Image (spheres, helix red, strand yellow):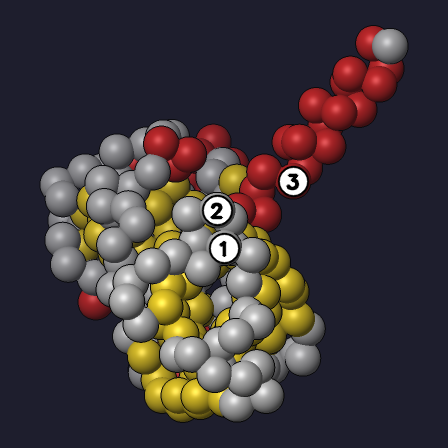
Amino acid sequence: MLGVFLLSILGLLAAAPAFAQTASVTGRVTDASGAVIPAATVVVVNQGTGLDRTTATNQSGYYTFSLLQPGKYQMRVESQGFKTVTRSGLVFETDQRAELNFAMEIGAVTEQIEVTANVAQLNTVEASRGQVIENRRIVEMPLNGRNYNQLALLSAGAVQPLAGARMEGFSVNGMRVSQNNFQLDGVDNNGIELAGAQRRSEMVQPSIDAIQEFKVQTNSYAAEYGRAMGAVVN
């Protein structure tokens, strides 16, 4: 029994890091009058890989998808007696918590309403502040020493440390460079004792050629990142 319990704990610990670098989307499905539509089928498709996931709205009309890999998506909503609604060109970024609501029109399921656009998703789910640095800027902007951390200076509140600082990197909101929290693919990438000897605050510094995107959170991030008072870099 103890062995099963320990295996369960280890499983949870292994799964927990996956939340840090993935996105989630939630929303509500209603009809034209604003009444909720329970048991509607909601499908999300990763347009880069073709993988899809399906869920159904609850009695309050809400649906949720978590653990979505960053990328471009299409979403489709179906319900008996309503036209199918499809939205394409949705971009979900690292650690994004998006809200996307659907209003359905009366009609046959075979009838479709399609919306194709690169929609910027406003963060109405939680209060964190930060910025995603996408692959184009990582690859195309000149970086001295190919250090992706220099691009973190594009985020509000991030500044270069004072000359002669013990560690390289960046300071956020007046905190020390060593107060930043680094997550690599959801795994703790902090190793002050060993990394400090190399004058950097992260344990492993990935090559810019290996980074799809990264997010720098500078304020009001979730309690799951409660390691330090500086920035959180995913």
Cα separation between marks 2 and 3: 29 Å
Residue 191 is tagged as none
Q: Amino acid at mark 1?
A: Pro
**Image position of 179 (left or right of 227):** left
Q: Amino acid at mark 2?
A: Gln
Q: Position of residue 166 (x, y in %)?
A: 28, 41
Q: Amino acid at mark 3?
A: Ala
Q: Which residue is pictured at 39% across the width and 79% down the height?
A: 105
Q: Which residue is pictured at 36% across the width and 32% down the height?
A: 223
User: Could you tell me if residue 178 is visible in this image?
Assistant: no
Return the residue nearer the eye: 173 or 52. 52
Q: Position of residue 39 (x, y in %)?
A: 56, 56
> Toward which corner of the image does residue 30 lie, by quadrant?
bottom left
Name the front one of labels 3 and 1: 1
The secondary element bearing badge 3 is classed as: helix
**Counting other residues with Cα less than 10 Å from the Cα at mark 1, is it few (<14), some (14-19), or many (20 or more)?**
some
Residue position for label 2: 59
User: Could you tell me if residue 189 is visible in this image?
Assistant: yes
Residue position for label 3: 15
Q: Earlier in the sequence, mark 2 or mark 3?
A: 3
Q: Is residue 42 above or below residue 85?
A: above
**Image position of 43 (left or right of 37):** right
Cα separation between marks 3 and 1: 30 Å
**Is the C-beta separation of discs 2 and 1 under 8 Å?**
yes
Residue position for label 1: 38
> Toward which corner of the image does residue 154 lie, by quadrant?
bottom left
Q: Position of residue 82 (x, y in %)?
A: 49, 76
The secondary element bearing badge 2 is classed as: loop
Q: Earlier in the sequence, mark 3 or mark 1?
A: 3
Return the residue nearer the eye: 96 or 168. 96
